[in-house]
């Protein structure tokens, strides 16, 4: 399990006077003072829910339901809780009668693993543990773990060793373990959006580490979202417009194991290393789950392959800041 203090820096931010605005279809727009807000931590990130609603009691009830959903998903996906389902799977190698959300997210993870030629791989958790142990030791070798240790760890990695069905999840490789940190925040965001849509909300912004818009702002303009500069905390590389879409950003600078940033949370499952192809990769997609997974995978792929994948995915765009600071846009 990763150290509780090892958290990724936030790479995406809301650019607006209000973090979110929502109203019931056909209802009146709420005043700015009517906001119902919640901020806390979940799945290793700072998250927030903010709703503007003509009925403050109903708004508070919806926020509370979203919080309950997030906490329930934490019990499934969080590596920061020893009692979570994912930690139980990593300890024993099997889950019997898994929760429906666990099955759905693992199946989505395998879909994105196949789509990206294995660049997205939920079984890279042993690599995280390898580097966390190495760099938390006394006087760690700045070149990283010894080659033999890396080879031993890579033998545990590979999404082909993850078997998922409605009644059973199994890891077939000895010592294998999974992480859903590259997709779980997006999934939680989508589940919150599903709940709010069912409640009749037609314009809101949900921020759970990844951001997804329902409709546009109440006045009809797009939501403005800022993409963080990975090398300058507090600064933005650009702002983008969102209407009924989600956005996610991945960058090696989001978490570094070593002071020089040669080893980050973005692992190439084929080599066990952290390639520094780009300063950051942002993906805009119909769902936060897709945006989250693809931004992780695209960080490891050449631009030509990213263009090929984007061309097969409706309403997906990748915005890549290369090592020199230039912007590359890939869309269909």
Image (cartoon, rainbow, N blue to C red):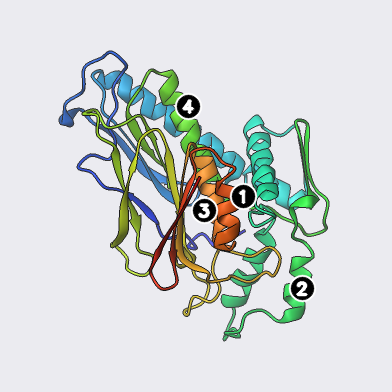
Instruction: Tell me: residue 327, above or below residue 120.
Output: below
Percent across and percent down for residue 138 are 58, 83
Measuring from the top left, give residue 219's x and y in whole percent: 21, 29
Label pair 1/4, CB-CB below 8 angstroms: no
User: Marks 2/1: CA distance?
Assistant: 27 Å
Name the quadrant containing residue 156: bottom right
Q: Identify which residue is drawn at 55% across, 50% down.
A: 294
**Res 151 label:** 2
The numbered disc on residue 295 is: 3
Left or right of 85: which side holds 181? left
Residue at the image point whose x is 26% and y is 28% from the top: 52
Kindly give the residue lying farthest to the top in the view shown.
26
SS at mark 2?
Answer: helix
Q: Is residue 174 left or right of residue 247?
A: right
For discs 2 and 3, the disc positioned in front in the rendered view: 3
Give the mark, 1 or 4, whose residue is nearer the N terminus: 1
Question: Which residue bears the numbered disc 4?
Answer: 194
């Amino acid at each position: 399990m990763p150290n509780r203090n090892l958290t990724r820096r936030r790479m995406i931010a809301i650019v607006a006077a209000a973090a979110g605005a929502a109203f019931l279809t056909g209802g009146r727009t709420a005043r700015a003072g009517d906001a119902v807000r919640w901020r806390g931590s979940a799945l290793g990130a700072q998250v927030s829910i903010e709703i503007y609603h003509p009925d403050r009691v109903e708004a508070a009830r919806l926020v509370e339901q979203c919080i309950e959903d997030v906490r329930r998903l934490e019990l499934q996906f969080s590596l920061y809780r020893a009692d979570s389902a994912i930690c139980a799977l990593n300890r024993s190698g099997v889950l019997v009668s898994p929760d429906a959300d666990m099955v759905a997210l693992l199946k989505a993870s395998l879909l994105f693993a196949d789509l990206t030629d294995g660049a997205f791989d939920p079984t890279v958790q042993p690599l995280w543990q390898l580097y966390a142990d190495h760099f938390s030791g006394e006087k760690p070798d700045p070149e990283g773990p010894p080659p033999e240790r890396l080879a031993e760890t890579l033998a545990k990695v590979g999404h082909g060793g993850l078997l998922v069905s409605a009644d059973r999840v199994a890891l077939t490789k000895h010592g294998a373990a999974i992480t859903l940190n590259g997709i779980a925040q997006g999934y939680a965001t989508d589940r919150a959006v599903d709940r709010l849509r069912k409640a009749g909300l037609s314009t809101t912004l949900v921020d759970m580490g990844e951001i997804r818009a329902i409709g546009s702002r109440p006045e009809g303009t797009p939501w403005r979202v800022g993409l963080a500069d990975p090398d300058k905390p507090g600064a933005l590389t650009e702002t983008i417009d969102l209407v009924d879409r989600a956005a996610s950003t991945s960058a090696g600078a989001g978490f570094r194991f070593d002071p020089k940033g040669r080893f980050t949370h973005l692992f190439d499952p084929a080599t066990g290393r952290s390639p520094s192809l780009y300063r950051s990769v942002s993906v805009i997609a119909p769902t936060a789950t897709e945006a989250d997974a693809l931004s992780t995978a695209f960080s490891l792929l050449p631009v030509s392959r990213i263009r090929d994948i984007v061309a097969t995915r409706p309403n997906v765009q990748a915005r890549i800041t290369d090592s020199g600071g230039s912007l590359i846009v890939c869309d269909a």
